[in-house]
Amino acid sequence: MQEKHPGEQEFLQAVKEVLLSVEPIYNTHPEFERAKIIERMVEPDRILTFRVTWEDDRGELHVNRGYRVQFNNAIGPYKGGIRFHASVNLSILKFLGFEQTFKNALTTLPMGGAKGGSDFSPRGKSEAEIRRFCQAFMLELWRNLGPDQDVPAGDIGVGGREVGYMYGMYKKLQREHTGSFTGKGLQFGGSLLRPEATGFGALYFVNQMLQDQNMDISGKTVAISGFGNVAWGAALKATQMGAKVMTISGPDGYVFDPDGISGEKIDYMLELRNSGNDIVAPYAEVYPKAEFHAGKKPWECPVDIALTCATQNELNEQDARMLIDNKVKCVAEVSNMGCTAEAADLFIENRMLFAPGKAVNAGGVATSGLEMSQNAMHLSWSSDEVDQRLHHIMSSIHEQCLAYGKEGNYINYVKGANIAGFMKVAQAMLAQGPL
Ligand code: 2IT
């Protein structure tokens, strides 16, 4: 693995976690071994990289690199988000595409795994610059997309606005108004509840984890990291369920609000995000009772529930130790691979209630799948209908984790999610022959 993917730390980390989980079951299936399922699964179907040239507001040209990793389409068309962030590289997109494959399998819907993006940083860019970048990016990628081929969506740095610009360009070039993107605006084929879905789904999942241990989410304190779309949806649903959200965070530090982050403060998160500055410090100026801790992460706060909602590897071993010492009751990755391998191992060794991103945050892509269904049928469902389906999907994912993750009284959600996702993809690959 290491030699074939040199230096790709995040990708190797994601693969190692899955392989360790599935090893025992893999060994009881010689037909998987004969079909070289693992070797095929860790190699993306194809990787597209391309130059993106765009012009800033002063007329200066810039060159960024665009990517699409079409990882695996054994169970459905390629599906997964697009990330615009300065940190984007092939290792990160391969890890995300790999994770997406198993996550999408868990959703019960027919979607393969993919991920794309660019090292373009939206930070401090004007609206017009963002638009020109999105259009330039699509000018290259459009040929590889289609409702039954590859269907992108948003991720870090890509929200409704960016999807609108990319989809507009796609439609112009393809001359078809088909559902080749999800996370679209409600006026042109988007699904109700898609913006909320990742956070809402995560809280439905966390609620089930707690209920399974005879705990109630109401009255619990919650630490949330990040302040983007995922953190927003999580804060909204946690508050609705009667929990108290104590923190949000950005690259500049975290905010602790002793009164809880609810109501208009959650709306204010959107304003902060829309400023394009990628900082949370202004929250403490608008709400003076809140404390801003520069350069720190929210995991030092004593809370009942910790939710990573920002990015990969944002909670490390030391953070995990602090949370355990502070008697955290439940930790859930809402960001993809939010915890380092050491942090995740520590939670599992300590028999903590801990669940991985590919289960917890699958409500986002699941609702993208529901958007695809609505587009294919040329109709739109009410938000109640979408919410009911999302509920159903999240409990089905929880059940799949239980089916494969029970270790005596302990539920190893990492193992459960990895095996359940793997088995579905492996069986689909086996059935379709050695391609
Ligand atoms: O990580 C993810 O699951 C997403 N960014 C959403 C992908 C999607 O296609 O909705």
Image (cartoon, helix red, strand yellow):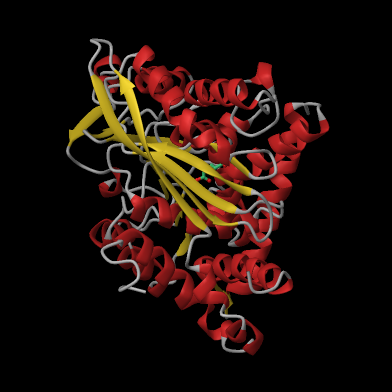
Which residue appears at 33% of the width and 17% of the height?
275
158 with respect to 395 (left or right)? left
Residue furthest out toward the top: 58
Q: Which of the image's four quarters has the C terminus?
A: bottom right
Q: Which residue is drawn at 74% across and 72% down?
A: 431
Residue 364: image x %, image y %? 58, 41
Q: In this view, does 155 lie above or below 176?
A: below
**What's the residue at 57%, 32% (across, down)?**
196
| Residue at image location 66% in from the left, 53% down from the top | 107
Placement of the N terminus among the 4 image quadrants: bottom left
**Looking at the image, is 351 positioned above or below residue 339?**
below
**Quarter of the figure with residue 13:** bottom left
Closer-to-camera residue (44/313): 44
144 with respect to 230 (left or right): right
Residue 323 in the image, given as x and y percentages of width and height: 32, 56
Q: How many labels does the image show?
A: 0
Q: In which quarter of the image is residue 288?
A: top left
Q: Locate residue 254: give its quadrant.
A: top left
* Residue 232 visible to an observer of this rendering: yes
Counting from the top left corner in percent of width and height, residue 139 is at 48, 28
For this rendering, which residue is in front, 146 or 29? 146
Q: Nearer the viewer, residue 382 or 398?
A: 382
Question: Where does residue 159 sit, x and y in percent of width and height?
Answer: 48, 28
* Residue 409 seen in render: no
